[in-house]
Amino acid sequence: MTNEELWQAALGEIEISISKANFITWFKNTTILSNTNGRVIIGVPNGFAKEWLENKYNSYIIRALQSFHSDVKEISCIINHNQSLFTAQSKNIDAIKAPGQELKNTSLPPKIASIKPSVSNHDTNLNSRYLFDNFIVGENNELARAACYAVSQNLGKLYNPLFIYGGVGLGKTHLLQSIGNEIISKYPEKRVKYITSERFTTELIDSIKNQKIDKFKDEYRKIDLLIIDDIQFLAGKEKTQNEFFHIFNALYQINKQIVLSSDRPPKAIPTLEERLRSRFEGGMITDIIQPDLETRMAILKAKAVEKNFYIEDEVIRFIAENIKNNIRELEGALNRVIALCDFTKKPPVLSTVKQALAGIISSGRKNDVQYKHIIKIVSDYYKISYEELVNKSRQREIVRPRQITMYLLRSELNASYPGIGGWLGGRDHTTVLHAYEKIHKELEINEKLKDEIKVLQDAIYKL
Ligand code: ADP
Ligand code: MG
Protein backbone atom coordinates (compact mmCIF):
# COMPACT_ATOMS: atom_id res chain seq x y z
CA MET A 1 0.00 0.00 0.00
CA THR A 2 1.48 3.35 -0.93
CA ASN A 3 1.15 6.28 1.45
CA GLU A 4 -1.42 7.77 -0.84
CA GLU A 5 -3.50 4.59 -0.82
CA LEU A 6 -3.16 4.26 2.94
CA TRP A 7 -4.37 7.80 3.44
CA GLN A 8 -7.31 7.41 1.06
CA ALA A 9 -8.36 4.28 2.92
CA ALA A 10 -7.99 5.95 6.31
CA LEU A 11 -9.93 8.99 5.12
CA GLY A 12 -12.74 6.69 4.13
CA GLU A 13 -12.90 5.39 7.69
CA ILE A 14 -12.65 8.82 9.27
CA GLU A 15 -15.32 10.21 7.00
CA ILE A 16 -17.94 7.84 8.37
CA SER A 17 -17.10 8.54 11.98
CA ILE A 18 -17.31 12.35 11.99
CA SER A 19 -19.74 14.87 10.53
CA LYS A 20 -19.29 15.84 6.91
CA ALA A 21 -18.70 19.49 7.82
CA ASN A 22 -15.94 18.56 10.24
CA PHE A 23 -14.48 16.15 7.73
CA ILE A 24 -14.28 18.71 4.93
CA THR A 25 -13.01 21.42 7.21
CA TRP A 26 -10.17 19.46 8.72
CA PHE A 27 -9.19 16.83 6.22
CA LYS A 28 -9.33 18.78 3.00
CA ASN A 29 -5.87 19.09 1.39
CA THR A 30 -4.18 16.65 3.71
CA THR A 31 -1.78 13.94 2.66
CA ILE A 32 0.71 11.49 4.15
CA LEU A 33 4.23 12.83 3.77
CA SER A 34 6.04 9.90 5.34
CA ASN A 35 5.43 6.70 7.24
CA THR A 36 8.44 5.27 9.04
CA ASN A 37 8.81 3.14 12.17
CA GLY A 38 5.19 3.52 13.11
CA ARG A 39 5.30 7.27 12.86
CA VAL A 40 3.10 8.88 10.25
CA ILE A 41 3.64 12.46 9.23
CA ILE A 42 0.65 14.19 7.73
CA GLY A 43 0.94 17.28 5.57
CA VAL A 44 -1.75 19.84 6.34
CA PRO A 45 -2.45 23.20 4.70
CA ASN A 46 -2.29 25.38 7.82
CA GLY A 47 -1.58 25.61 11.53
CA PHE A 48 -5.20 25.49 12.34
CA ALA A 49 -5.67 22.07 10.75
CA LYS A 50 -2.47 20.88 12.47
CA GLU A 51 -3.89 21.84 15.86
CA TRP A 52 -7.15 20.00 15.22
CA LEU A 53 -5.73 16.89 13.66
CA GLU A 54 -3.11 16.48 16.36
CA ASN A 55 -5.37 17.22 19.29
CA LYS A 56 -9.00 16.55 18.49
CA TYR A 57 -8.75 13.90 15.82
CA ASN A 58 -5.59 12.17 16.91
CA SER A 59 -7.24 8.98 18.09
CA TYR A 60 -9.61 8.78 15.08
CA ILE A 61 -6.68 9.06 12.71
CA ILE A 62 -4.54 6.51 14.52
CA ARG A 63 -7.42 4.05 14.71
CA ALA A 64 -8.22 4.49 11.02
CA LEU A 65 -4.58 4.08 9.98
CA GLN A 66 -4.13 1.04 12.20
CA SER A 67 -6.98 -0.77 10.55
CA PHE A 68 -4.94 -0.81 7.33
CA HIS A 69 -1.43 -0.68 8.72
CA SER A 70 -1.16 -2.20 12.17
CA ASP A 71 2.35 -0.80 12.81
CA VAL A 72 1.16 2.78 13.07
CA LYS A 73 1.75 4.16 16.57
CA GLU A 74 1.67 7.91 16.38
CA ILE A 75 0.98 10.76 14.04
CA SER A 76 2.17 14.31 13.73
CA CYS A 77 1.35 17.08 11.31
CA ILE A 78 3.53 19.38 9.32
CA ILE A 79 2.29 22.49 7.60
CA ASN A 80 2.82 21.90 3.96
CA HIS A 81 2.77 25.30 2.28
CA ASN A 82 3.50 23.91 -1.15
CA GLN A 83 0.25 22.15 -1.13
CA SER A 84 -2.36 23.84 -3.20
CA LEU A 85 -4.89 25.33 -0.87
CA PHE A 86 -7.73 24.73 -3.16
CA THR A 87 -7.03 21.39 -4.70
CA ALA A 88 -8.61 18.62 -2.80
CA GLN A 89 -6.19 15.76 -2.43
CA SER A 90 -8.69 13.21 -1.51
CA LYS A 91 -11.21 11.56 -3.74
CA ASN A 92 -13.62 11.62 -0.86
CA ILE A 93 -13.37 15.35 -0.57
CA ASP A 94 -13.37 15.90 -4.31
CA ALA A 95 -16.67 14.18 -4.56
CA ILE A 96 -18.46 16.70 -2.44
CA LYS A 97 -17.32 19.73 -4.39
CA ALA A 98 -20.34 21.20 -6.12
CA PRO A 99 -20.28 20.54 -9.86
CA GLY A 100 -18.90 23.37 -11.91
CA GLN A 101 -17.28 25.03 -8.94
CA GLU A 102 -13.61 24.79 -9.70
CA LEU A 103 -11.61 26.35 -6.94
CA LYS A 104 -8.64 28.45 -7.93
CA ASN A 105 -5.43 28.75 -6.04
CA THR A 106 -5.15 32.46 -5.85
CA SER A 107 -4.43 34.94 -3.13
CA LEU A 108 -7.60 36.78 -3.99
CA PRO A 109 -10.74 35.25 -2.65
CA PRO A 110 -12.52 33.29 -5.32
CA LYS A 111 -15.85 34.68 -6.30
CA ILE A 112 -18.34 33.74 -3.66
CA ALA A 113 -19.91 30.49 -4.65
CA SER A 114 -23.50 30.92 -5.54
CA ILE A 115 -25.27 29.62 -2.54
CA LYS A 116 -27.75 26.94 -3.38
CA PRO A 117 -31.27 28.31 -3.17
CA SER A 118 -32.88 26.81 -0.18
CA VAL A 119 -35.55 24.59 -1.56
CA SER A 120 -38.10 24.35 1.13
CA ASN A 121 -40.87 21.92 0.93
CA HIS A 122 -44.08 23.74 1.74
CA ASP A 123 -45.74 20.81 3.34
CA THR A 124 -42.97 20.13 5.80
CA ASN A 125 -41.75 23.74 6.15
CA LEU A 126 -38.23 22.33 6.15
CA ASN A 127 -35.29 24.23 4.79
CA SER A 128 -32.90 21.88 3.02
CA ARG A 129 -29.92 23.96 4.17
CA TYR A 130 -30.13 22.59 7.70
CA LEU A 131 -28.46 19.21 7.83
CA PHE A 132 -26.51 17.13 10.33
CA ASP A 133 -23.78 17.12 7.72
CA ASN A 134 -23.10 20.82 7.95
CA PHE A 135 -23.54 21.11 11.69
CA ILE A 136 -20.21 21.53 13.47
CA VAL A 137 -19.99 19.64 16.71
CA GLY A 138 -18.34 21.21 19.73
CA GLU A 139 -18.51 20.60 23.44
CA ASN A 140 -21.34 23.11 23.69
CA ASN A 141 -23.72 21.20 21.45
CA GLU A 142 -22.52 17.63 21.25
CA LEU A 143 -25.17 16.22 23.56
CA ALA A 144 -27.98 18.02 21.80
CA ARG A 145 -26.63 16.93 18.45
CA ALA A 146 -26.30 13.32 19.59
CA ALA A 147 -29.85 13.32 20.94
CA CYS A 148 -31.25 14.77 17.71
CA TYR A 149 -29.30 12.32 15.60
CA ALA A 150 -30.40 9.39 17.74
CA VAL A 151 -34.02 10.48 17.38
CA SER A 152 -33.63 10.66 13.60
CA GLN A 153 -32.47 7.03 13.63
CA ASN A 154 -35.15 5.76 16.02
CA LEU A 155 -38.21 7.83 15.30
CA GLY A 156 -40.75 7.74 18.11
CA LYS A 157 -38.93 4.98 19.91
CA LEU A 158 -36.10 6.52 21.85
CA TYR A 159 -36.65 9.94 23.34
CA ASN A 160 -40.18 11.23 23.14
CA PRO A 161 -40.56 14.13 23.28
CA LEU A 162 -37.08 15.46 22.67
CA PHE A 163 -36.72 18.93 24.14
CA ILE A 164 -33.75 21.13 23.17
CA TYR A 165 -33.22 24.46 24.87
CA GLY A 166 -30.67 27.26 24.66
CA GLY A 167 -30.16 30.95 23.80
CA VAL A 168 -30.73 32.57 20.42
CA GLY A 169 -28.56 31.77 17.44
CA LEU A 170 -26.97 28.69 18.97
CA GLY A 171 -28.25 26.14 16.46
CA LYS A 172 -31.56 24.87 17.84
CA THR A 173 -33.51 25.40 14.63
CA HIS A 174 -30.64 23.95 12.62
CA LEU A 175 -30.66 20.75 14.67
CA LEU A 176 -34.44 20.40 14.76
CA GLN A 177 -34.66 20.80 11.01
CA SER A 178 -31.79 18.35 10.50
CA ILE A 179 -33.95 15.65 12.05
CA GLY A 180 -36.76 16.49 9.63
CA ASN A 181 -34.46 16.56 6.61
CA GLU A 182 -32.86 13.28 7.58
CA ILE A 183 -36.26 11.64 7.84
CA ILE A 184 -37.70 12.90 4.55
CA SER A 185 -34.54 11.95 2.68
CA LYS A 186 -34.67 8.40 4.04
CA TYR A 187 -38.40 7.87 4.27
CA PRO A 188 -40.15 10.17 1.81
CA GLU A 189 -43.48 8.62 2.75
CA LYS A 190 -43.25 9.85 6.35
CA ARG A 191 -45.22 12.94 7.29
CA VAL A 192 -42.98 15.55 8.78
CA LYS A 193 -44.04 18.98 9.93
CA TYR A 194 -41.86 21.77 11.23
CA ILE A 195 -43.64 24.76 12.71
CA THR A 196 -42.88 27.54 15.16
CA SER A 197 -45.18 27.80 18.14
CA GLU A 198 -46.26 31.24 16.98
CA ARG A 199 -47.29 29.92 13.57
CA PHE A 200 -49.03 27.02 15.27
CA THR A 201 -51.03 29.48 17.35
CA THR A 202 -51.99 31.54 14.31
CA GLU A 203 -53.08 28.48 12.35
CA LEU A 204 -55.10 27.28 15.29
CA ILE A 205 -56.86 30.62 15.73
CA ASP A 206 -57.61 30.80 11.99
CA SER A 207 -59.04 27.31 11.99
CA ILE A 208 -61.31 28.19 14.89
CA LYS A 209 -62.42 31.34 13.11
CA ASN A 210 -63.15 29.45 9.91
CA GLN A 211 -64.79 26.56 11.75
CA LYS A 212 -62.16 24.15 10.55
CA ILE A 213 -60.81 23.10 13.89
CA ASP A 214 -61.63 19.43 13.34
CA LYS A 215 -59.75 19.41 10.04
CA PHE A 216 -56.85 21.17 11.78
CA LYS A 217 -56.68 18.51 14.48
CA ASP A 218 -57.04 15.66 12.01
CA GLU A 219 -54.15 16.97 9.94
CA TYR A 220 -51.91 17.10 12.97
CA ARG A 221 -52.83 13.64 14.08
CA LYS A 222 -51.55 12.18 10.81
CA ILE A 223 -48.04 13.46 11.39
CA ASP A 224 -45.12 11.06 12.03
CA LEU A 225 -42.65 13.70 13.16
CA LEU A 226 -43.92 16.96 14.61
CA ILE A 227 -41.28 19.62 15.28
CA ILE A 228 -42.38 22.71 17.18
CA ASP A 229 -39.76 25.42 17.46
CA ASP A 230 -39.59 28.13 20.13
CA ILE A 231 -42.25 26.62 22.34
CA GLN A 232 -41.72 29.39 24.94
CA PHE A 233 -44.15 31.51 22.92
CA LEU A 234 -46.97 29.26 24.06
CA ALA A 235 -46.58 30.87 27.48
CA GLY A 236 -49.80 32.50 28.55
CA LYS A 237 -51.81 31.12 25.62
CA GLU A 238 -54.18 28.83 27.44
CA LYS A 239 -56.41 27.87 24.54
CA THR A 240 -53.45 27.01 22.31
CA GLN A 241 -51.82 25.02 25.08
CA ASN A 242 -55.00 23.08 25.57
CA GLU A 243 -55.28 22.13 21.89
CA PHE A 244 -51.60 21.36 21.75
CA PHE A 245 -51.95 19.10 24.77
CA HIS A 246 -54.54 16.99 22.96
CA ILE A 247 -52.53 16.80 19.76
CA PHE A 248 -49.47 15.92 21.79
CA ASN A 249 -51.25 13.07 23.56
CA ALA A 250 -52.80 11.73 20.37
CA LEU A 251 -49.39 11.55 18.70
CA TYR A 252 -47.55 10.34 21.75
CA GLN A 253 -49.89 7.43 22.33
CA ILE A 254 -49.23 5.99 18.90
CA ASN A 255 -45.47 6.50 19.19
CA LYS A 256 -45.23 9.41 16.82
CA GLN A 257 -42.18 11.58 17.40
CA ILE A 258 -42.40 15.05 18.90
CA VAL A 259 -39.41 17.41 19.02
CA LEU A 260 -39.54 20.76 20.76
CA SER A 261 -37.22 23.69 21.30
CA SER A 262 -37.26 26.61 23.63
CA ASP A 263 -34.96 29.34 24.90
CA ARG A 264 -35.24 27.87 28.41
CA PRO A 265 -36.06 24.57 30.11
CA PRO A 266 -39.75 23.63 30.57
CA LYS A 267 -39.60 24.47 34.27
CA ALA A 268 -38.70 28.04 33.47
CA ILE A 269 -41.48 28.74 31.00
CA PRO A 270 -43.93 30.87 32.95
CA THR A 271 -47.62 30.01 32.73
CA LEU A 272 -47.00 26.72 31.04
CA GLU A 273 -49.76 24.38 32.11
CA GLU A 274 -48.56 21.85 34.61
CA ARG A 275 -49.77 18.90 32.57
CA LEU A 276 -47.86 20.11 29.48
CA ARG A 277 -44.75 20.76 31.53
CA SER A 278 -44.80 17.25 32.89
CA ARG A 279 -45.30 15.86 29.36
CA PHE A 280 -42.25 17.81 28.18
CA GLU A 281 -40.23 16.61 31.11
CA GLY A 282 -41.25 13.03 30.44
CA GLY A 283 -38.85 12.72 27.51
CA MET A 284 -35.30 13.82 26.97
CA ILE A 285 -34.20 17.37 27.74
CA THR A 286 -30.85 18.71 26.64
CA ASP A 287 -29.34 22.15 26.22
CA ILE A 288 -27.03 23.98 23.84
CA ILE A 289 -24.74 26.55 25.37
CA GLN A 290 -22.45 29.14 23.85
CA PRO A 291 -19.60 27.74 21.80
CA ASP A 292 -16.04 28.10 23.06
CA LEU A 293 -13.32 29.76 21.01
CA GLU A 294 -12.22 26.52 19.35
CA THR A 295 -15.72 25.68 18.23
CA ARG A 296 -16.35 29.21 17.00
CA MET A 297 -13.19 28.97 14.92
CA ALA A 298 -14.23 25.59 13.58
CA ILE A 299 -17.65 26.91 12.59
CA LEU A 300 -16.17 29.92 10.82
CA LYS A 301 -13.74 27.72 9.00
CA ALA A 302 -16.49 25.36 7.89
CA LYS A 303 -18.71 28.23 6.74
CA ALA A 304 -15.81 29.73 4.78
CA VAL A 305 -15.13 26.37 3.12
CA GLU A 306 -18.84 26.04 2.34
CA LYS A 307 -18.69 29.36 0.56
CA ASN A 308 -15.41 28.52 -1.21
CA PHE A 309 -13.79 31.44 0.49
CA TYR A 310 -10.23 31.08 1.64
CA ILE A 311 -9.40 32.79 4.88
CA GLU A 312 -6.19 32.84 6.93
CA ASP A 313 -6.12 31.29 10.37
CA GLU A 314 -5.20 34.55 12.06
CA VAL A 315 -8.22 36.20 10.53
CA ILE A 316 -10.50 33.37 11.60
CA ARG A 317 -9.08 33.67 15.09
CA PHE A 318 -9.65 37.43 15.16
CA ILE A 319 -13.31 37.08 14.22
CA ALA A 320 -13.89 34.21 16.64
CA GLU A 321 -12.19 36.02 19.49
CA ASN A 322 -14.29 39.10 19.00
CA ILE A 323 -17.70 37.66 18.25
CA LYS A 324 -18.78 35.37 20.98
CA ASN A 325 -22.46 35.58 21.56
CA ASN A 326 -23.90 33.32 18.98
CA ILE A 327 -23.40 31.65 15.68
CA ARG A 328 -25.79 33.81 13.80
CA GLU A 329 -23.61 36.84 14.61
CA LEU A 330 -20.53 34.87 13.70
CA GLU A 331 -21.98 34.03 10.28
CA GLY A 332 -23.04 37.64 9.84
CA ALA A 333 -19.49 38.79 10.49
CA LEU A 334 -18.07 36.32 8.01
CA ASN A 335 -20.56 37.45 5.38
CA ARG A 336 -19.49 41.04 5.93
CA VAL A 337 -15.87 40.10 5.43
CA ILE A 338 -16.68 38.17 2.26
CA ALA A 339 -18.78 41.02 0.90
CA LEU A 340 -16.08 43.59 1.57
CA CYS A 341 -13.35 41.46 0.00
CA ASP A 342 -15.50 40.78 -3.00
CA PHE A 343 -16.27 44.45 -3.38
CA THR A 344 -12.73 45.78 -2.91
CA LYS A 345 -11.08 42.79 -4.63
CA LYS A 346 -8.70 42.61 -1.70
CA PRO A 347 -7.84 39.39 0.11
CA PRO A 348 -9.11 39.05 3.67
CA VAL A 349 -6.04 40.20 5.57
CA LEU A 350 -6.38 41.22 9.19
CA SER A 351 -6.55 44.95 8.47
CA THR A 352 -9.39 44.50 5.96
CA VAL A 353 -11.26 42.36 8.42
CA LYS A 354 -10.83 44.84 11.24
CA GLN A 355 -12.27 47.47 8.95
CA ALA A 356 -15.18 45.27 7.88
CA LEU A 357 -16.08 44.50 11.43
CA ALA A 358 -15.31 47.85 12.99
CA GLY A 359 -18.97 48.69 13.46
CA ILE A 360 -19.66 45.45 15.26
CA ILE A 361 -16.73 45.15 17.59
CA SER A 362 -14.71 48.34 17.94
CA SER A 363 -16.79 49.81 20.72
CA GLY A 364 -15.19 47.36 23.07
CA ARG A 365 -18.58 46.16 24.20
CA LYS A 366 -18.90 42.44 24.60
CA ASN A 367 -15.12 42.14 24.33
CA ASP A 368 -13.42 39.94 26.81
CA VAL A 369 -15.79 40.78 29.60
CA GLN A 370 -15.78 38.03 32.16
CA TYR A 371 -18.49 37.20 34.64
CA LYS A 372 -16.15 37.84 37.56
CA HIS A 373 -15.51 41.32 36.24
CA ILE A 374 -19.24 42.05 36.16
CA ILE A 375 -19.76 40.68 39.67
CA LYS A 376 -16.91 42.85 40.94
CA ILE A 377 -18.28 46.01 39.29
CA VAL A 378 -21.70 45.44 40.88
CA SER A 379 -20.33 44.64 44.33
CA ASP A 380 -18.07 47.72 44.23
CA TYR A 381 -20.93 49.91 43.12
CA TYR A 382 -23.31 48.78 45.84
CA LYS A 383 -20.52 48.46 48.41
CA ILE A 384 -21.22 44.87 49.29
CA SER A 385 -18.78 42.01 49.25
CA TYR A 386 -18.60 39.18 46.77
CA GLU A 387 -19.51 36.73 49.57
CA GLU A 388 -22.63 38.71 50.45
CA LEU A 389 -23.65 38.69 46.81
CA VAL A 390 -23.38 34.92 46.44
CA ASN A 391 -24.53 33.77 49.88
CA LYS A 392 -28.13 33.14 50.87
CA SER A 393 -28.91 36.48 52.48
CA ARG A 394 -32.40 37.71 51.74
CA GLN A 395 -31.88 41.28 52.95
CA ARG A 396 -33.26 43.79 50.52
CA GLU A 397 -29.91 45.66 50.31
CA ILE A 398 -28.36 42.45 49.03
CA VAL A 399 -31.22 40.89 47.06
CA ARG A 400 -31.57 43.86 44.77
CA PRO A 401 -27.90 44.10 43.71
CA ARG A 402 -27.89 40.33 43.29
CA GLN A 403 -30.81 40.57 40.88
CA ILE A 404 -29.06 43.36 39.02
CA THR A 405 -25.96 41.17 38.76
CA MET A 406 -28.05 38.38 37.31
CA TYR A 407 -29.62 40.79 34.86
CA LEU A 408 -26.24 42.10 33.70
CA LEU A 409 -24.71 38.66 33.37
CA ARG A 410 -27.56 37.76 31.08
CA SER A 411 -27.77 41.00 29.12
CA GLU A 412 -24.04 41.56 28.69
CA LEU A 413 -22.72 38.02 28.34
CA ASN A 414 -25.84 36.27 27.10
CA ALA A 415 -24.95 33.62 29.65
CA SER A 416 -27.33 30.74 30.30
CA TYR A 417 -29.64 30.90 33.32
CA PRO A 418 -28.22 27.75 34.90
CA GLY A 419 -24.70 29.10 34.27
CA ILE A 420 -25.48 32.37 36.04
CA GLY A 421 -27.07 30.46 38.92
CA GLY A 422 -23.86 28.49 39.23
CA TRP A 423 -21.65 31.60 39.34
CA LEU A 424 -23.84 33.10 42.05
CA GLY A 425 -23.57 30.46 44.71
CA GLY A 426 -25.39 27.59 43.00
CA ARG A 427 -28.78 29.20 42.61
CA ASP A 428 -31.57 27.60 40.66
CA HIS A 429 -32.01 28.80 37.09
CA THR A 430 -35.63 29.75 37.74
CA THR A 431 -34.43 32.25 40.38
CA VAL A 432 -32.13 33.79 37.78
CA LEU A 433 -34.84 33.88 35.17
CA HIS A 434 -37.21 35.53 37.60
CA ALA A 435 -34.59 38.16 38.53
CA TYR A 436 -33.78 38.84 34.90
CA GLU A 437 -37.40 39.31 33.95
CA LYS A 438 -38.15 41.44 36.99
CA ILE A 439 -35.34 43.89 36.22
CA HIS A 440 -36.07 43.80 32.51
CA LYS A 441 -39.71 44.75 33.11
CA GLU A 442 -38.90 47.37 35.68
CA LEU A 443 -36.47 49.08 33.31
CA GLU A 444 -39.42 50.11 31.18
CA ILE A 445 -40.86 52.25 33.94
CA ASN A 446 -38.07 53.00 36.41
CA GLU A 447 -35.78 55.81 35.21
CA LYS A 448 -33.56 55.59 38.27
CA LEU A 449 -32.90 51.93 37.67
CA LYS A 450 -32.18 52.69 34.03
CA ASP A 451 -29.51 55.17 35.07
CA GLU A 452 -27.98 52.70 37.49
CA ILE A 453 -27.75 50.01 34.84
CA LYS A 454 -26.23 52.50 32.43
CA VAL A 455 -23.57 53.49 34.96
CA LEU A 456 -22.80 49.84 35.62
CA GLN A 457 -22.56 49.05 31.92
CA ASP A 458 -20.21 51.98 31.40
CA ALA A 459 -18.08 50.74 34.27
CA ILE A 460 -18.02 47.23 32.82
CA TYR A 461 -16.72 48.50 29.52
CA LYS A 462 -14.65 51.30 31.10
CA LEU A 463 -16.32 53.92 28.96
P1 ADP B 1 -31.41 29.15 17.10
O1 ADP B 1 -32.57 28.41 16.52
O2 ADP B 1 -30.84 28.46 18.30
O3 ADP B 1 -31.70 30.59 17.38
P2 ADP B 1 -30.21 28.67 14.51
O4 ADP B 1 -30.37 27.20 14.40
O5 ADP B 1 -31.13 29.52 13.73
O6 ADP B 1 -30.22 29.11 16.04
O7 ADP B 1 -28.69 29.00 14.15
C1 ADP B 1 -28.26 30.28 13.71
C2 ADP B 1 -27.33 30.13 12.51
O8 ADP B 1 -26.13 29.51 12.93
C3 ADP B 1 -27.91 29.22 11.43
O9 ADP B 1 -27.54 29.74 10.17
C4 ADP B 1 -27.22 27.89 11.66
O10 ADP B 1 -27.07 27.18 10.45
C5 ADP B 1 -25.88 28.31 12.22
N1 ADP B 1 -25.34 27.33 13.16
C6 ADP B 1 -25.66 27.21 14.47
N2 ADP B 1 -24.96 26.23 15.06
C7 ADP B 1 -24.16 25.71 14.10
C8 ADP B 1 -23.17 24.66 14.08
N3 ADP B 1 -22.87 23.98 15.19
N4 ADP B 1 -22.56 24.38 12.92
C9 ADP B 1 -22.86 25.08 11.80
N5 ADP B 1 -23.76 26.09 11.75
C10 ADP B 1 -24.41 26.40 12.88
MG1 MG C 1 -34.47 29.12 16.14
Image (spheres, rainbow, N blue to C red):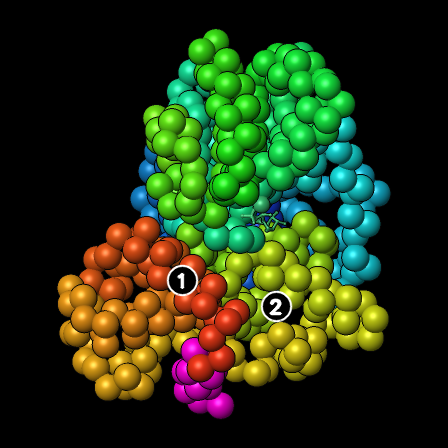
Numbered range of the magenta stretch: 449-463
Three-letter code for the amino acid on which mark 2 is drawn: Glu
Q: Identify the residue at image location x=64%, y=46%.
A: 89
**As drawn, 198 above or below 400:** above
Q: Identify the residue at image location x=78%, y=35%.
A: 119
Q: Nearer the viewer, residue 364 or 106?
A: 364
Q: Which residue is mark 1?
A: 438
**As drawn, 223 above or below 105:** above
Percent position (x, y) of residue 313?
56, 67
Q: Is residue 458 visible?
A: yes
Secondary element at tag 1? helix
Quarter of the image for residue 300 reads bottom right
Quarter of the image for residue 69 reads top left
Percent position (x, y) of residue 444?
52, 69
Prevailing secondary structure class for the magenta stretch in the rendered image: helix
Q: Nearer the viewer, residue 72 or 168?
A: 168
> Does residue 460 belong to the magenta stretch?
yes
Q: Which residue is mark 2?
A: 312
- Mark 2 closeness class: few <14, some 14–19, many ≥20 residues within 10 Å: some
Percent position (x, y) of residue 135?
55, 43
Count the marks: how many?
A: 2
